[in-house]
């Protein structure tokens, strides 16, 4: 059995390596980029959405260090593409600041075009979103969200950091902290089966009366089965 698992893991790694080897790479830099550029390493795009828009399935977008805000850097949509969007040096150096509030609701990412785990979001801090799923909203989609920090996002409804509706995202090695919502201060799930693995969920706040679920940071709605629930909750 162990040998079979090892062989399977090797196949997955080889497949991922092959996919990356055949990918086109596009680059984003909020300081030196221009959205009319071709997105190469020497002439990067300025906004994340502009780079995603020119991608084909299997491509990779590399985002340079910086603070990303404004049009093209919030309400970002993968448009159903199986691509990898990753920061160059991790979430401490690459921040998406939605700069949203009740009068101006915005979120960082919306996945609502049947994305699956081949749509990968890797290595961003997402902050100051406002709305249902203030940081990330997954509807009928199941992306992979890995190595991200979601902090100080706010919802007057469901899901301070992330909301899932008929969605099965993989949430891996993320820090979800200091978010708030009426229901599901960190994560709200309805009719969803997310995988939450190796995550720290801390100091999130639910402001309403719905305190059901794993804890008051995570709200379990009807028909939710939370698979591989390996995470740490800190108050």
Image: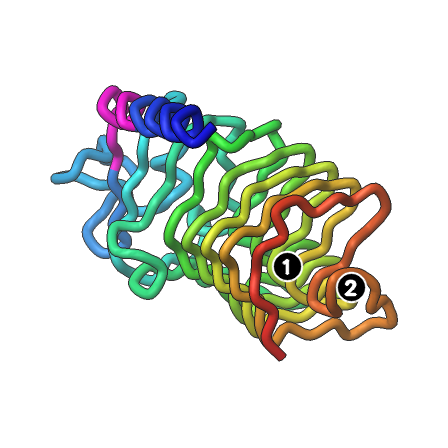
Instruction: Inspect this view and state whether residue 99 appears.
Output: no
Q: Secondary structure at mark 1?
A: loop
- State the image coordinates of residue 83 (x, y, percent, origin top left): 40, 30
Task: Name which residue lies at 52% across and 65% down.
Answer: 200
Q: Answer above or below: position of 171 versus 10.
A: below
Q: Earlier in the sequence, mark 1 or mark 2?
A: 1
Would you say 28 lies left or right of 141 here?
Answer: left
Depth check: 33 or 144 in front? 144
- State the image coordinates of residue 133 (x, y, percent, origin top left): 66, 54
Task: Name which residue lies at 54% across and 64% down.
Answer: 176
- State the image coordinates of residue 156 (x, y, percent, origin top left): 75, 66
Would you say 183 lies left or right of 101 here?
Answer: right
Q: Secondary structure at mark 2?
A: strand
Would you say 80 lies left or right of 140 here?
Answer: left
Where residue 40 sits, quadrant-wise, is: top left
Return the residue found at the far left. 42
Where residue 22 sits, quadrant-wise, is: top left
Task: Name which residue lies at 27% across and 35% down.
Answer: 36
CA neighbours of label 2 inside 10 A, class few (<14), some (14 to 19), many (20+): many
User: Which segment is the magenta one?
Assistant: 17-26
Would you say 47 lies left or right of 143 here?
Answer: left
Q: Which residue is mark 1?
A: 105
Q: Which residue is mark 2?
A: 183
Depth check: 51 or 208 in front? 208
- State the image coordinates of residue 104 (x, y, percent, origin top left): 62, 62
Q: Answer above or below: position of 154 versus 74.
A: below
Task: Name which residue lies at 29% across and 47% down.
Answer: 63
Give the alpha-carbon distance from disc 1 to disc 2, as whole Å: 17 Å
Depth check: 48 or 177 in front? 177
Q: Answer above or below: position of 164 versus 150.
A: above
Q: State the quadrant of the C terminus.
A: bottom right
């Amino acid at each position: 059995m162990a040998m079979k698992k090892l062989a399977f893991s090797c196949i997955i790694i080889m497949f991922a390596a092959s996919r990356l080897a055949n990918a086109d790479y596009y680059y984003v830099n909020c300081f030196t980029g221009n959205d009319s550029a071709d997105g190469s390493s020497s002439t990067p795009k300025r906004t994340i959405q502009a780079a995603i828009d020119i991608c084909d399935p299997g491509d990779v977008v590399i985002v340079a260090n910086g603070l990303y805000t404004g049009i093209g850097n919030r309400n970002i949509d993968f448009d159903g593409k199986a691509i990898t969007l990753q920061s160059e040096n991790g979430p401490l150096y690459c921040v998406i600041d939605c700069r949203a509030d009740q009068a101006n609701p915005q979120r960082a990412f919306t996945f609502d075009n049947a994305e699956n785990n081949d749509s990968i979001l890797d290595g961003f801090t997402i902050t100051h979103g406002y709305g249902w799923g203030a940081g990330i909203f997954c509807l009928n989609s199941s992306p992979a969200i890995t190595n991200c920090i979601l902090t100080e996002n706010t919802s007057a409804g469901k899901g301070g950091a992330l909301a899932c509706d008929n969605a099965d995202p993989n949430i891996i090695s993320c820090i979800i902290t200091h978010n708030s919502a009426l229901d599901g201060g960190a994560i709200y799930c309805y009719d969803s089966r997310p995988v939450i693995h190796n995550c720290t969920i801390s100091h999130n706040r639910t402001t309403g009366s719905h305190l059901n679920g794993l804890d008051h940071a995570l709200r379990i709605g009807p028909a939710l089965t939370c698979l591989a629930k390996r995470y740490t909750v800190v108050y």
